[in-house]
Amino acid sequence: MTTQDELARTAERLRDALNAAADVMAECDAAAVITPVPQRPGRPRRARAWLIPLGAAACVVAVIAASVLLATNLARTSSSASQPAHPAFPICQPLPAAAPGMALPRFYVTTDVAARQIQLQVRRTSDCAITAVVPLPAGWLLTGGISATAGDRTFFAAAFSPKSCPVQGGAVGISSAAHETRFFRFAVNDQGRAGRLTVVGPPVAGIVGPIAVSPDGSRIAFNAANGNFMGPGKACAGGEAEGAAIRVIDLATGKIRTWQALEMPTGPAGPSVTPGAVSWLADGRTLAVSYVWPTSMSGPQLSMAVAALDTTSGGGSLQAHSHLLWSQPQKCVFCVQEALISPDGKSLTATAIQHTARGYRNVLLQIALPSGRYRVLYESPPARNQASVTFTQDGSGQHPIMVSASQMGWIRAGKLVLLRAPASALQFSLGITTIAW
Amino acid sequence: MKPSGFSAQSLAEVFRCRRSELVRLGAFILGDRQAAEDVVQDVFLRMHQRGDRLADLDDPLPYLRGAVVNGCRSVLRRRLLIRRHAGQDQPYPPLSAEEAMLLSEERRQVLAALSRLPARRREVLVLRYYAGLSEAEIAATLGISTGTVKSTAARGLAALAFALKEP
């Protein structure tokens, strides 16, 4: 006999598996566009004669669309002659003036994964216009997303390249070690023009999770539990996927330091603790790590906390080198899922879910430290299903940008001010920061 | 008279933005990504051919979803016939080996259990938990009653839970 609890858990597992599989398919679709796969000998593809009329039809549609776009762009050329030609998206609103002492970054970066080659797009905050386009090298896919330094002029991206590794017997196989993650950096000048994309730090085998760059851009932190991090070295180097851990790469020396996950002393669920998002304090040495653990073996309920890790400690136990900043109350109205610390360490910005009679609300909270008092920055209308929501914040920690299932925008006085960005970027948002400033 | 309708330009935009999503929907129902791509191509081709009627649609997505599900049913029917008579036509898995590697073992088990469900239950569960449709929307898409959607979803979920419990 299947209980209601089991059905609810199965539904949640099914939703999670389908969305994860859809994300993987979307990533690999993009990869296939970038790197055409050579036809295997002896396995001819089906002849697709029907594609000919479809191609012709698509050409007609493209010509119509191009002529309309051309007409639109011609009408706008007088005012924006130096801009690259992009279709107009009507959802970007003018940015309200910033409060004194809280200057907004002038530029932010979004991603366009639908392009033939994945592009990082530099946009001007004041009008959302694209000022530069930086393509990733051919064949590379974003994995750890993008991150900005405190100065909003240097941006980092983590990307991986799928490769095949020789395995025993001379056959070619795919394994976690077959992926190599590299870190890329580029700078933006006062006009929004981008410099060259350069590779920084050592390559790491495997796929790393979302990254956080220290305020001065000298170190990259990431949560190895989100991917299949294998360790330093090139792809195919072998090794076993390690457990949950936080790692920091020192870009000047190339050294990687590791802190192993916390182990909860007792509890019905055992010591299964998963680190989540990481964010830096302004001092560039303290890293805030959010982590979750199951409260019981039977249910999907999770508890959540944020700890401050001293990254000058050189590595070792995450528990030994960190202290607790905040933990989720046992009965939460707004149940926090992910939290980033403000650079001054005085508050957390957090995404949370509120269960109401009319459905789920996605909420963005600001939680004061150490009191734990919170205020709601943004609350979405109730929806039937929990949407995937990620967010990032600028160097001051005062201007969060939120990416939900259907919308992307910054939070201003409790209101979501929509940003102009390609819808395709949103499809890439699960677990990956697709916007940085 | 409608102030604005759907145009050939909109179709190109919908194709660009929604094709992947529809292919994934088809792939989950069929368990065969290549066949799902063919179904979606056919749907868009048909839609383009009947361009004079596009202006009737303000939002083409529900229509497209329904058309993709119908296309998938045709493929399943054909596949059943072929299997019955020739014992052939092994479908491609919805995920390649490399893509499957990117998923955890637990998620792979869930997808495998889903692929073993009867087609109707699979359709309902995919529309509910992947496309996020309400019971009424699923009923409209599949051309069945809301009650049937409810019972099919409940039975599908119970079968899935049972399959996942098995060692």
Image (cartoon, coloured by chain):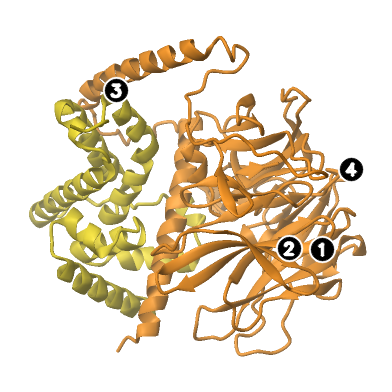
Chain colours: A orange, B yellow
- What label sits on residue A348 in the rendered view? 2
Point 29% across, 21% down: residue: A61
How far is disc 4 from disc 3 in space, using C-alphas? 50 Å
Q: Which amino acid type is shown beneath numbered disc 2?
A: Leu
Splitting the image into 4 quarters, where does residue A2 fall?
bottom left
Give the residue at mark 4: A252
How far is disc 1 from disc 3 in space, using C-alphas? 55 Å
How far is disc 2 from disc 1 in space, using C-alphas? 7 Å
**Same chain letter for marks 2 and 1:** yes
**Of label 2 and label 4, which has the lower sequence position?**
4
Q: Evaluate whether residue B166 shows in this view.
A: no
Mark 2 vs mark 3: in front: 2
How far is disc 2 from disc 3 in space, using C-alphas? 49 Å
Mark 1 surroundings within 10 Å by alpha-carbon count, few (fewer than 14), some (14 through 19), many (20 or more):
few
Question: In this view of the protein, which residue sits in the foreground, A205 or B52?
Answer: B52
The chain carrying label 2 is A
Give the residue at mark 3: A58
Asked whether, in this view, residue A206 is left or right of residue B100, the answer is: right
The chain carrying label 3 is A
**Of label 2 and label 3, which has the lower sequence position?**
3
Mark 2 vs mark 4: in front: 2
Point 15% across, 31% down: residue: B53
**Of label 1 and label 3, which has the lower sequence position?**
3
Q: Secondary structure at mark 3?
A: helix
Q: Which amino acid type is shown beneath numbered disc 3?
A: Ala
